[in-house]
Amino acid sequence: MLEFVFLAPFLAGIIAFFIPRNLGRPLLVIIGAIHLLLSILIWIRRPVSMFPEYFAVTPEGLLSLLVISLLFFLISIYTTGYLKASNIKSEHIFTGSMLLFLSTMTLVTLSDHIMVMWIAIEATTLASAPLIYTHRTSASLEATWKYVLICSVGIAMALLGSVLITVAMDVGKVDASISFSSLTAVAKSLDPMWLKAGFVFILVGYGTKMGLAPMHTWLPDAHSEAPSPASALLSGVLLNCAYLGIFKTNNIMVAAGLGDFSGTILMVFGIISILAAATFILKQTEYKRMLAYSSIENMGIIAFGTGVGGLAAYGAILCLIHHSLIKSSLFLTSGNILLGYGSRLIKGTGNLVNRMPKTFVAFFAGFAGISGFPPFGIFIGELLIILGTFRAGHYVGVGIFILSLCVIFAGFANQVLKISFDDTDATIPLPEKAVMVWPQYALLLTSLVLCFWLPGTLYQTIMNAVTSVGGGF
Amino acid sequence: MNNPVDIILSFVLLSCLFSFGSSRLPGLIKVLAFQGVVVSIVPLFIDHHMSGGGILFTMVTLTIRGIVIPLCIYLAIKKVAIHREVEPIVGYHASLLAGLGLIVAAMFVSRNFDVPDSTSVLLLPSAITVLVAGMFLLMARRNAIAMVLGYIMMENGIYLVGTTFSAHARHIVEFGILLDVLAGVMIMAIILQNIRRTFDDVDTALLRTLKE
């Protein structure tokens, strides 16, 4: 039953390549609903896999799986409207790739074996490349080329890192299966030198995919050129999947007593990413690129929090969940703006509040959420990270962190206000379809509700995920 | 130097230097094919008690690395870019010098690592050399096909590390690397076709519209 959750979208994806477009759209929604149901079932029943060496249900995997399911279901509803409104030539490739993408990402969340994890993350790159090239323009071609090349090189680094970890087992004379859970159990007897080298390569490799600076250069291009539902998936869940690989490797490092080493590197990469985002967000001229840089910032925050550990690690997981919810809603909203105004440039928009009032509500609420305003969850996550960093005594780090957040907020607010309130020549309201607004509302509402009322089982799962890195209160 | 593995590995090092000096795409592809073959046979000489399945797997790897992939790339570029230069960003002589420096540096670095009961002193240095040489080609050549070849060379380096050091998980590692190369090259080839159709060239200098 565990395997069914990634096999179903895989099969449906292959079928989607061959069926006419009026069947492809409902198929997307149906598979989204089935996937969500299965994920909830897995959450409740916690089944054991038929291949326990390769797949396992872990708390961090479960969290990501549920987020993926929920996001995909809502995005698939939005996509039906988006596909009707926009003019995509080879729609069957788009729907097929979306489903394959879902399948590979599900595989990432469930894999426990180092190599299976790596294969799954590699597969996400391959499945998502056609999505970025959907519009068939030369700019989207360039973005796809950059994405595939940079991510392939990155993933090759991660492969080397995984190989080095198996070398660490051989040198340390350890005999265990190379799954994350069994490696964490025997971490103490692994050879520290090779393990450190392995971690660095895995961090650089999966960090490329996660969008950590300075390996982030593909991310703004890919996210801005892909159609909005695909951008929402790329930003909302693909980055989480890559993070999962880093998180699990970090667990091995902490169990091996090398937590300081890995934590410091994670913090450094986190700070660099936040700084890079702060530099580039200030003078962005395209709104989708601006959102992409905000993703880099949030990934930096999450890496930083994980590196600090303790309270901050709990905050990082909260940020991870809420970033997915809010950022994917923002990308979907940016799709509405693009369809309405027909321009990617911030200059080409304006007066959103009067021309697209429903979209404006989603856009502005998403902006408030992503910049860390209460009552959205990122506020709590960032607050916990800051408290945890103070508690751990990294005063310089937390100083840079807070300062960069302020700069990013200022830059972001400037652009959002331009889009929302600037005067335009035309004032006629643009059409807005309900199916392309409600999914965003649902995502934002989920974030809002989770901020005030965290169900007991969810809280327990987050705690289980972070106890391995010394997280919690 | 009487160990057969060392002799094979010195060929690998030589192929890296050759690749730095080759200016034409067909030459570079031939060097890569040669390197693919040489790298694939290394496990045969290291593992003295190899099973029949292991030998078969090595042969499959050899065929794919040494014949199938180079041939595919050769056929793919035959129409447009056959006599094209690789459009270096770093010149050939500077590249060669960098290559020599790289080999020395790799020797120096690899002394710090505790190698698991290895039979060859050249193993880790040549793995590092091939890996970094691949990255160098990726960065120092503007031609998209030369970049793909650099990527394949990088994978060769990882293959050397994976199959020779980790006795533990050899087959799954080999499988993973093979998958990576095949899938990566395939998707890159598709994009290359599209780049060629759109721009009528494979020079990545044309891909410069998206930047800050």
Image (cartoon, rainbow, N blue to C red):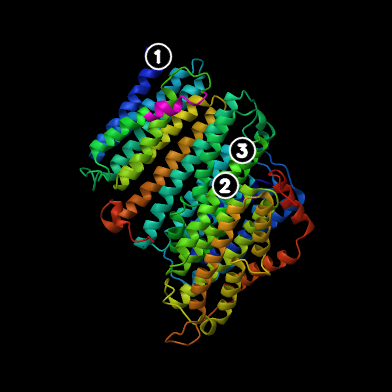
Q: Secondary structure at mark 1?
A: loop
On the image, the x and y values in percent for residue A373 come to 64, 69
Residue denoted by label 1 = B3
The amino acid sitting under disc 1 is: Asn
Task: Give the quadrant of the N terminus of chain B.
Answer: top left
- Residue A262 at least partly seen: yes
Residue denoted by label 3 = A113
Parent chain of label 3: A
- Dot 3 surroundings within 10 Å: few (below 14), some, or many (20 or more)? many
The amino acid sitting under disc 2 is: Leu
Parent chain of label 1: B
Which residue is found at the position 42% from the left and 87% from the top?
A425
- Dot 2 surroundings within 10 Å: few (below 14), some, or many (20 or more)? many
Q: Which residue ends up furthest to the right in the rendered image? A: A456
Q: Is residue A65 above or below residue A50?
A: below
Magenta range: B105-114
- Residue A66 at least partly seen: no
